[in-house]
Image (cartoon, rainbow, N blue to C red):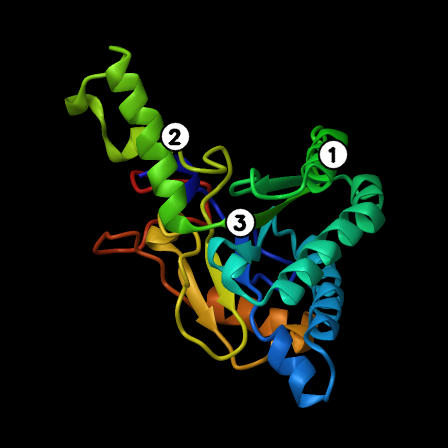
Amino acid sequence: MRTSEISSRPADQTGQLVPRHVAIIMDGNNRWAKRRGLPGPAGHRAGVEAVRGVLRACREKGVEVLTLFAFSSENWGRPQPEVRALLALLSRYLRNEVRELHKDGIRLRFIGQRSRFSERLRRLMQQSEQLTAANTEATVVIAVDYGGQWDIAQAARQLAQRVLDGELQPAQITPELIDRHISISDLPRPDLCIRTGGDARVSNFMLWHFAYSELYFTNILWPDFDEAEFACALADYSQRERRFGLRDAPDLTAGGGVNA
């Protein structure tokens, strides 16, 4: 088990336990727009406002890492006007928001494939990462053209190449070694995954990472998921007893691990 999976969790001023890493599947933008007689892109634009609110709440609560599922590998199969609108919105977000994130000391990172994006968008992503690389207040991870199965497969390819190169024996491949080749392996694993929109599944998101994550599903559509709704998710999480496969829950509040 990775040390970061069993490290201590911060508590807010009320004593409520706070996850170090929250991952969110932001679902319901299109339905939100449809219910209001608006085109789909309007829902995605409203979703950006929800991102701002949740990011504020994370900073106030002391959440260290926020990972957002912005564009899945399967999203390429959506109607092309919607795909173009999503990518244009991502470009606009990077142009308009990154300098503000940088001023607030937030590091921005991306996970997923980048080869299918335009050169311009890839350059924006790279510049955003470079600008914010040294920031330490918090980390925002944006998953784009990402799939959990792809993530595991790319880790397997790296290890297979090392075997072919004679650097590694198959018997040396362990879960811990695979873990080091999975995306954002240097960050704490997600303590909490939130999915909005009413569906109760993880939809190929961070499959390796979610081994011991707590899952929280809500019917609230993403554009309506405000700071109050986020607080409800954190309150629910604070009541969970996390055992990490053990009979008794490890003491995570005193900075100790399973052997503390």
Check disc 2 and report the residue beneath it: 180
Mark 1 vs 2, N-terminal side = 1
Q: Are marks 1 and 3 in contact (CB under 8 Å)?
A: no
* Position of the C terminus by quadrant: top left
Q: Quadrant of residue 2?
A: top left
Q: Amino acid at mark 2?
A: Arg
Q: Dot 2 surroundings within 10 Å: few (below 14), some, or many (20 or more)?
A: few
Depth check, front residue: 115 or 12? 115
- Image coordinates of residue 60 in percent, x first then y, are 72, 57
Task: Residue 254 in the image: state x and y as whole percent.
Answer: 46, 45
Mark 3 and mark 2: Cα distance apart in space: 21 Å
| Quadrant hosting residue 166 | top left
Check residue 132 in the rendering and tell me which mark sits there, or answer none. Answer: 1
Q: Earlier in the sequence, mark 3 or mark 2?
A: 3
Mark nearer the viewer, 3 or 2:
3
Could you tell me if the residues under marks 1 and 2 are in contact, i.e. CB atoms within 8 Å? no
Query: Which residue does the numbered mark 3 point to in the structure image?
Result: 145
Label 1 to label 2: alpha-carbon separation: 23 Å
Image quarter in which the N terminus is found: top left
7 left or right, relative to 83: left
In the image, taking residue 209 as reference, residue 125 lies left or right, namely right
Residue 80, above or below 131: below
Toward the left, the furthest residue is 171
Residue situated in front as seen by the camera: 243 or 174: 174
